Amino acid sequence: MNQLDALRQFTTVVADTGDFHQLAQFQPQDATTNPSLILKAVQKPQYAPLMRAMVAQWKGRGLDEVMDRMLVRFGCEILETIPGRVSTEVDARLSFDTQATVTRAERLIELYQAAGVHTDRVLIKIAATWEGIEAARRLEQRGIHTNLTLLFSFSQAVACGQAKVQLISPFVGRIYDWYKKQAGASWDEAAMAGSNDPGVQSVRKIYEYYKHFGIGTEVMGASFRNTGQILALAGCDLLTIAPELLAQLGEADDALAPLGRALDAQQAKAKAMPLTRWSLDEASFRFALNEDAMATEKLAEGIRAFTVDTRKLEVLMQQAAD
């Protein structure tokens, strides 16, 4: 048995890609996309015609609508390959506008429904700003399920749990990146690996808090830099993994170092928690996030990066229209 099959015993495996031709070989349950992954896909020869066809079909419509239609087309292609759900992201430029996020999410869902896809098979990805979490709360009340992304802090996770969002995506690798950069030459890679990895520890803390207090929001570790981070979170509800790392897990023999469950919901439920259950309003959320320099910096950086790639996608679409 390889490590990918071993991981499936404990955790739902999700593919983190816009390249739907790759999916079948890994047999994930769900798949996640984002602007950076879609940009990467449409620059490949096999996907460029899809983008040109979408631009030609909807010529004359607003660029934002054509973008949404293309994202949904990718999502529908992915859903042809997987049995579960696909995550489709709202434009990151709306991360601080609750109503605009709700409106855009509703349009994405309407486009999926028009394509014959049931709402339960779609998660709307939204940045975990205060405004994004509030948008997710409203969407969940309307039966539209959400995936809160760019999540780096415990305070973001607490607010998402209060909002009863379907799923959160704490970013393991980007947390790791920040602490490694801060440490500079003093960083000890071996000592900070596995369960000592700061990104892994962040997800564990959130997972145990949710399970201990019976919070129904699913935890999906994301943004991995190596397979060690993934294996250290075996037992997490879901893990979304890039194809390159899925391939590495698929090639690794589990018999050499048998994988065990690292996170356990029942143990977390019984565990004495060092924290009481938190309750955050907007002011306390913003203050708690501000106190966390890593989360504040990585959230802002993530929104900027997704915005850059969204604009690049728009340029490619405009070029295809000419």
Image (tube, helix red, strand yellow):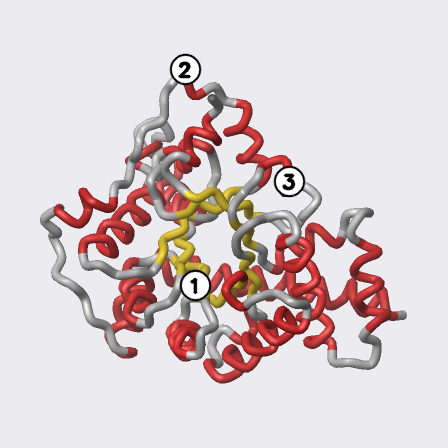
Q: What is the three-letter code of the residue carrying label 1? A: Leu
Residue 150 visible in image: yes
The secondary structure type at the circle numbered 3 is helix
Q: What is the three-letter code of the residue carrying label 2? A: Leu
Nearest to N terminus: mark 2 or mark 3: 3
Give the residue drawn at x 40%, y 60%.
167
The label shown at residue 313 is none
Nearest to N terminus: mark 2 or mark 1: 1
Label 1: which residue?
148
- Position of residue 41 relative to residue 122, above or below, is above
Name the side, left or right, on which 237 lies relative to 30. Answer: left
Q: Position of residue 188 (x, y in %)?
A: 34, 30
The secondary structure type at the circle numbered 2 is helix
Q: What is the three-letter code of the residue carrying label 3? A: Ala
- Tally of numbered discs: 3
Residue depth check, mark 3 versus mark 1: number of the one nearer the observer = 3
- Position of residue 207 relative to residue 233, above or below, is below
Q: Position of residue 257 (x, y in %)?
A: 37, 19
Residue 247 occupies quadrant: top right
Residue depth check, mark 2 versus mark 3: number of the one nearer the observer = 3
Contact between labelled residues 1 and 3, with CB atoms less than 8 Å apart: no
Most foreground residue, 286 or 72 = 72
- Position of residue 1 relative to residue 139, above or below, is above
Name the side, left or right, on which 26 lies relative to 96. Answer: right
Tell me if mark 1 has few (under 14), some (14-19) or many (20+) residues whose alpha carbon lies within 10 angstroms of its own: many
Tell me if mark 2 has few (under 14), some (14-19) or many (20+) residues whose alpha carbon lies within 10 angstroms of its own: few
The label shown at residue 256 is 2
Label 3: which residue?
24
